[in-house]
Image (cartoon, rainbow, N blue to C red):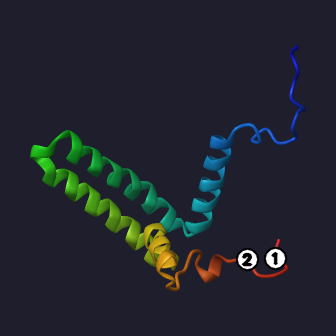
Amino acid sequence: MNQQLPASSDPLARRPLLRFARRALRNWLERHQHPFSFWIHLIGIPMTIIGVVLVILYPAEWHWGVGAFVLGYLLQFIGHQVEGNDMGEWAGIKRLLGLPYVAIAPRWQKKDGDP
């Protein structure tokens, strides 16, 4: 007996990984609205990832990987200073410790009645 599932109006309902990725991207874009912060993150994030990969694949040349990681992370830190919010890692740690944190800079937060 071949039964079909009812068609959902939401194509993401049957794709939880895609739904998660879209939600994560939407949250990331909301936290990086300043153009400088956005573009510096597009440089810093890959540089940080490349740094980790270099340390793992070429441990004898660890200083290049560490340098790339630190520079990439520094670029992201500068982006968040310009943006006016905490870095995702710091916001998560502060939230766990019950400390105040800035998830989205006040200038980008929607006010009541905003579309």
Q: Residues within 10 Å of mark 1 (few under 14, many from 20)?
A: few
The residue carrying mark 2 is: 110
* Front residue (pair 106, 40): 106
Label total for image: 2
How far is disc 2 from disc 1 in space, using C-alphas? 6 Å
- Residue 13: quarter of image: top right
> Mark 2 falls on what kind of element?
loop
Q: Quadrant of the C terminus?
A: bottom right
Three-letter code, disc 1? Asp
Please identify the quadrant where the N terminus is shown.
Answer: top right
Q: Residue at x 45, y 73 (%)?
A: 93
- Would residue 1 be found to the left or right of residue 104 on screen? right
Q: Position of residue 43 (x, y in %)?
A: 39, 55
Q: Is residue 56 above or below residue 77?
A: above
Q: Position of residue 89 (x, y in %)?
A: 44, 68
Q: Dot 2: within a 10 Å radius of its alpha carbon, few (fewer than 14), some, or many (20 or more) residues? A: few
Query: Which label was assigned to residue 106?
Result: none
For the point 44% across and 60% down, the residue is: 41
Task: Name the quadrant containing residue 107.
Answer: bottom right
Whether residues under marks 2 and 1 lie with C-beta atoms below 8 angstroms apart, the answer is yes
Q: Residue furthest top?
A: 1
Q: Residue at x 16, y 41 (%)?
A: 58
Q: Residue furthest left?
A: 60
Q: Residue at x 47, y 60 (%)?
A: 39
Along the horizontal axis of the image, is 81 left or right of 20?
left
- The residue at which mark 1 appears reads as 114
Residue 70 coordinates in the image, percent (x, y): 26, 63
Relative placement, left or right, of 58 versus 92 is left
Tell me the element at label 1: loop
Farthest bottom residue in view? 100
